Image (tube, rainbow, N blue to C red):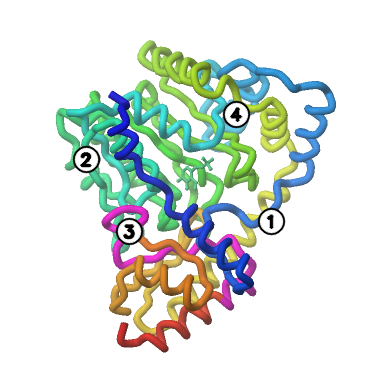
Amino acid sequence: MQTIAAFDRMGEENAFAVLARAAALQAEGRDIINLGIGQPDFKTPAHIVEAAIKALKDGHHGYTPASGLPQTREAVVRRTITMTGVEVSPDRVMIMPGGKPTMYAAITMFGEPGAEILYPDPGFPIYRSMIDFTGAKPVPIPIREENGFAFSAEETLSKITPATRLLIVNSPANPTGGVTPRSEIEKLVAGLAQHPHVAIMSDEIYDVMTYDGESHTSLLGFPEIRDRLIILNGWSKTWAMTGWRMGWSIWPEGPGGARLYDNVRKLAVNCWSCVNAPSQFAGIAAIDGPQDDVHAMLKAFDSRRKLVAKRLNAIDNIRCATPKGAFYAFPNIKDTGFKSKDLAARLLEESGVALVGGPDFGEYGEGYIRFSCAASEEQIEAAIKRFAAFLEKNKDG
Ligand code: PLP
């Protein structure tokens, strides 16, 4: 089934293309401010780096079990208890090379021609790309500004059909910064009782990144769906470890879950054998070590997201909801008269500001543009000044 045609259907993540173009312009000597990329601009905390160096010096150079070192999986169990109060079995925890491979595993296990998979739009582009790869029908769940960029339980449930195999949810969300409130998640879970044929993949990679006292609600807190729930999470964002390629997934309880877990273990054996050993030691240090650097990073993101919203809202024709989570702002640019991708492209070429157009996250992203707050406040201020000046200069499109 995964033929050349399937690979031809595979999409991409345009943020990487923006990054490449921004780097090329920088290499030409242009002054570029990059608010395009979804990675923290902080270094991995020193004690985590030290743990990886120690692991290498101690001789951890070989393969680990395909599902991850037992002690790394145990660390994930501890972290899950801290975040959600739920004790999962280490036999359902899989250490993955980043967050993305869990998407690949879950979507390819459920997707095939004739199946339908529900995914957030705008949402992380790889969901849609992987659904297309499998030949399943992609069914977007619109994520609406008027709903605070939360997903609507009612609208989500209304899209389920007998052919639906998998529902993908993401909160806190990329690219919108939306956080879906607990009440809406409770409604969704209650409604899912009518649809026992639907599995759920909850992407909780931004779980610590909520602001204004808003708290993250993990779907793990709902035992009634534990036998069909896959959790995607990882180290990339929380501990500024995007390049380490460290993620984890938690697979469903029960015999069906055991089968899925065994399948993902086999996928590892066939594709990557295991995640590199020193990174897995670093991952333990990240979870068990001091969290001061994480808190400092969250404080910086909190202050930046308020700054971005304030400065953007001061520009004519721009409306920006203050992000409730993650580290992205997703302003509405509809009144500028520009199409999102044209605006993003021209801003990079003419003003040296790298952003990602909303449609790179799905068709419902038209009319929006993503600002990543992964830059200093000075850079954010400067980027928004350039953005305002560009709009002023090109008032007539
Ligand atoms: N899920 C979401 C919602 C993301 O925004 C990202 C990265 O941007 C990922 C998953 C993938 O993370 P990783 O870099 O660990 O593969």
Is ligand 1 within 8 Å of the beta carbon of the residue shown at mark 2?
no
* Mark nearer the viewer, 2 or 3: 3
- Disc 3 is placed on an element classified as helix
Amino acid type shown at disc 3: Pro
- Disc 1 is placed on an element classified as helix
Check whether the beta carbons of the residues at disc 3 and disc 1 lie within 8 A of each other. Answer: no
Disc 4 crowd, CA 10 A, few/some/many (<14, 14-19, 20+): many
- Disc 2 is placed on an element classified as helix
In 3D space, how far apart are the residues under numbered discs 2 and 4 (Cα atoms)?
A: 31 Å
Q: Can you say whether 194 is above or below 89 in the image? A: below
In 3D space, how far apart are the residues under numbered discs 1 and 2 (Cα atoms)?
A: 38 Å
Check whether the beta carbons of the residues at disc 2 and disc 3 lie within 8 A of each other. Answer: no
How many marks can you see?
A: 4
Amino acid type shown at disc 4: Val
Disc 3 crowd, CA 10 A, few/some/many (<14, 14-19, 20+): many
Residue 395 appears in the picture as rendered: yes
In 3D space, how far apart are the residues under numbered discs 2 and 3 (Cα atoms)?
A: 24 Å
Amino acid type shown at disc 1: Ala
Q: Which mark is residue 296?
A: 1
Foreground of the two, 84 or 172 = 172
Q: Which mark is residue 157?
A: 2
Q: Which residue is mark 3?
A: 359
Residue at 42%, 34% (x, y): give it: 103
Looking at marks 1 and 2 on the same chain, the residue that comes earlier in the sequence is marked by 2
Q: Position of residue 79 (x, y in %)?
A: 61, 33
Q: Which residues are magenta?
A: 360-382
Q: Position of residue 132 (x, y in %)?
A: 28, 38
Q: Which residue is mark 4?
A: 76
* Mark nearer the viewer, 3 or 1: 3
In 3D space, how far apart are the residues under numbered discs 4 and 3 (Cα atoms)?
A: 34 Å
Is ligand 1 within 8 Å of the beta carbon of the residue shown at mark 4?
no
